[in-house]
Image (cartoon, rainbow, N blue to C red):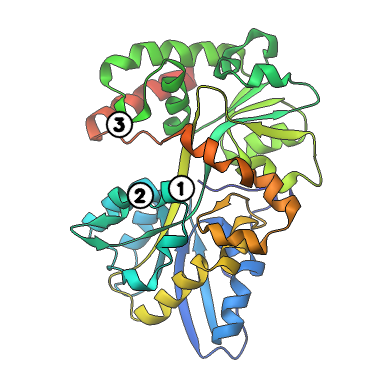
Amino acid sequence: MKKITLTTLFTIPLVICAGGAIAQEELNALVWCDHTDPGFVEPFEQANNVKVNLKDYEGTGTALSLIEQSQPGDWDVFVVDGIDVPRVVEAGLLAPLPEDALPTADLFPEIVMPENHVIDGKTYAITEKFGYNTISYNSNTVDAADVADISVMWNEKYKDRIAIYDYYLPVMGLVAMSLGIDTADIQESDLPAMRDRLFEMKDVSRQVGEVVSSQTAIATGEVDILVGGGEWVTAGLTSELPHLDWVIPEQGAVRWSQSVGVFADSKKPDLALKFVQYILSPEGQARLATSSCYWAMPANSKAADHLTDQQKKALRWDDQAAYLANAQLYPAPDAELDAKMQDVWTEFLQH
């Protein structure tokens, strides 16, 4: 997902970030947009006399297409959706990481996710940032008691004041949770009931849109609720729009995470690992967590020492234990079920 805060709602940042003019080396990284913030990447460039060329993308499929069009060795560092790490490892894209060079012990235990990152006893990636697809809302116009229950997604009280984030996995995950179905347990037999709930949601919504249009709608007051939102929508806007808030309903939320690894055919594996280590350092984590593109929780718990009290409050730092306990991972359907879920989503969009 590409996530963009108020400062960049209407303009996408350039994907190439220049380092010092006299940099001796270059590093190429395929990343999510939060890494393109100069405030994040420039300290590494200056400390290592290196230019980091950053290409941001939206969706793992897009990244794989870019890689396929590239020459071996063109890329050094890869930021990818945590649930897709096994997929890219199977494709031979990532090199094993030296475990003794990673701050795994400093990460929030729930997001280490060895089931995704460790394959055949080797670690190929590490979580760098995480957050939640849940409910964002305007606290001036929406009752907090209403958004505490996931049924607010189809509450007639807010008819035509709801926007829905156009990404089938997290939104269908939330729908499954509303039916008491764990995201990991979704089956084809659950789809009719999920379809009915989706249609109920569509009937009371004003729009279904991608990231920018959804964020614009809630930031400008066009809608009051964003289904699929979360801290990545509102945390960075706290100082500008303090009435925007987000909540994890009683039934829970869907947790997303992004992981980072080194390309197997990188020509600069040592420098690439050094960049990964910077990303995972407490200082790098604090900068990444509060990137101008979008805010979200850093994986390294020691980043707290480098965040202000206001930043930690916006990220709900002190609530993470409860949030992590009440969140489920994105659905990870096999190819057959995934195709059927996409069919339901397409029908929902056309409804």
- From the viewer's perspective, is residue 210 above or below residue 237? above
In the rendered structure, the answer to whether residue 280 lies left or right of residue 75 reads right
- From the viewer's perspective, is residue 37 above or below residue 217? below
According to the picture, the residue beneath numbered tag 1 turns out to be: 257
Q: Quadrant of residue 181?
A: top left
**Residue depicted at 31% across the width and 55% down the height:** 117
- The amino acid sitting under disc 1 is Ser
The reply to whether dot 2 and dot 1 touch (C-beta < 8 Å) is yes
In the rendered structure, the answer to whether residue 141 lies left or right of residue 174 reads right
Image mark for residue 113: 2
User: Residue 336: horizontal and vertical position, in percent?
Assistant: 23, 30
According to the picture, the residue beneath numbered tag 3 turns out to be: 338
Query: Residue 325, can we see it?
Result: yes
CA distance for labels 2 and 3: 22 Å
Query: Residue 351, can we see it?
Result: no
Q: Between 253 and 212, which is closer to the camera in this rendering?
A: 253
Give the crowd class for mark 2: few <14, some 14-19, many >=20 residues within 10 Å.
Answer: some
**Residue depicted at 61% across the width and 24% down the height:** 207
